[in-house]
Amino acid sequence: MLHRIVLADNSGCTSESNVDTNTFTYLGNVVDNPDLRCVSVLPNGQIQLEWLTPLSSSANFNEFEIYRNSGAGFVLYDSVSNFNQVSWTDAFANGNAQSYSYYMRSQSGCTGQVDNGATSATLNSIYVTTTGILGQATINWNAHPLLPTSAATGYDVQTSYLTGNSLTLLTSTLGLTANEVINDCDTTLLHRIVLADNSGCTSESNVDTNTFTYARNVVDNPDLRCVSVLPNGQIQLEWLTRLVRVPTSMNLKFTEIAVPDSYCMTR
C-alpha cells in the first residue's frame, strides 16, 4: 500500500509528504482442525486414519498436518493438502507389532502457517494380545480411547476358531480386557477388537493368533482290588469297572463308557 500526507493552505498551495510504500497483511481465515474419528490396522500392518472435514469455511486453507508417535514422542509425520480428503494411510507403520498414536492440526490463514491453537483428538491404533491358562483365553488391548461418538457398548471383541473363517462377536465391553472359555484341546483362535463410531467408520485392531487348551475330561483311577499269581506264574490284576462321563461335543453332552475290569501281566 502507498500512503501520503497532504496539508492544504488557503493561499491555494499544498504541503505534501513523501509517498510511503509498505506491505501489510492480516490473520485471514483460520480453519478448524479435522475431527479425527477412527484409526484402523489393515491386514498388512499399515494404519488408516479417517476423519470428518471441518464445518467452517475452507478459505485460506493450506494443509492438515498429521503427527505420529511410534514410541519416541510425537513428530510431524505427513500432511494432506486436499481440504475434502477424509482418510490417509500410514504406509510405513506396522500395527501388527505395536500401537501408534496420531493427532491432526490445520494450517491456514493468509500465510498458510496459522494454526488455531488446538489439535484434534489423539487416537491410538488398537493392538490386541492374548494369553492362555488351562480352559481360558485372556484378551488384552490398549485404549483407542472411547470417544463421545463411539458406540455405547464400547469395544467389540471378535473371535474365530479357524483361520479363514469370519470373526464373530464374542462380547462387547467398555474395558480393555475380556475372557473366552476354551472347551477344546489345542485350539487355535483368532481375536480382533473393533470400535464403531457414529460417523460410520470403525477402528479395528490387528488380528491376534494363539493356541489354547484345556484339561478335557479327567478320568478317575480304576479301583484296584486284587492281585493274583496264576499257576503259570503270571500275575493277574483285577479292579472294579467304572463308568466315566466323557464330553462328546462342544456343548458338553456326555457319553458313559466302561473301563475294562481286568488285565493280565506276565513277569
Image (tube, rainbow, N blue to C red):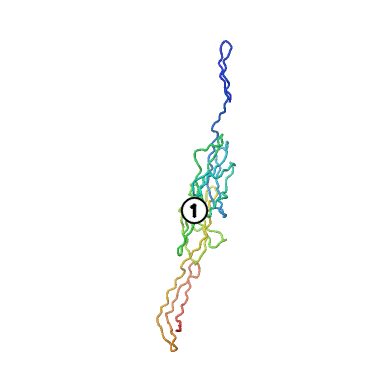
**Residue 257 at x, y percent in the picture:** 47, 75
Q: Quarter of the image holding residue 9?
A: top right
Check disc 1 and report its element: helix, strand or loop: strand
**Crowding at label 1, few (<14), some or many (≥20) Cα neighbours within 10 Å?**
many
| Residue farthest toward the top in the current orientation of the protein | 11
Dot 1 corresponds to which residue? 155
Q: Is residue 9 above or below residue 101?
A: above
Give amino acid for label 1: Tyr
Camera-side residue of 247 and 161: 161
Q: Residue at x 57, y 40 (%)?
A: 63
Number of numbered discs present?
A: 1
Q: Is residue 2 above or below residue 187?
A: above
Image side of residue 173 versus residue 92, left or right: left
| Residue farthest toward the left in the current orientation of the protein | 225
Quadrant where the C terminus sits is bottom left
**Residue 173 at x, y percent in the picture:** 47, 54
Camera-side residue of 23 and 162: 23
**Residue 253 at x, y percent in the picture:** 48, 69
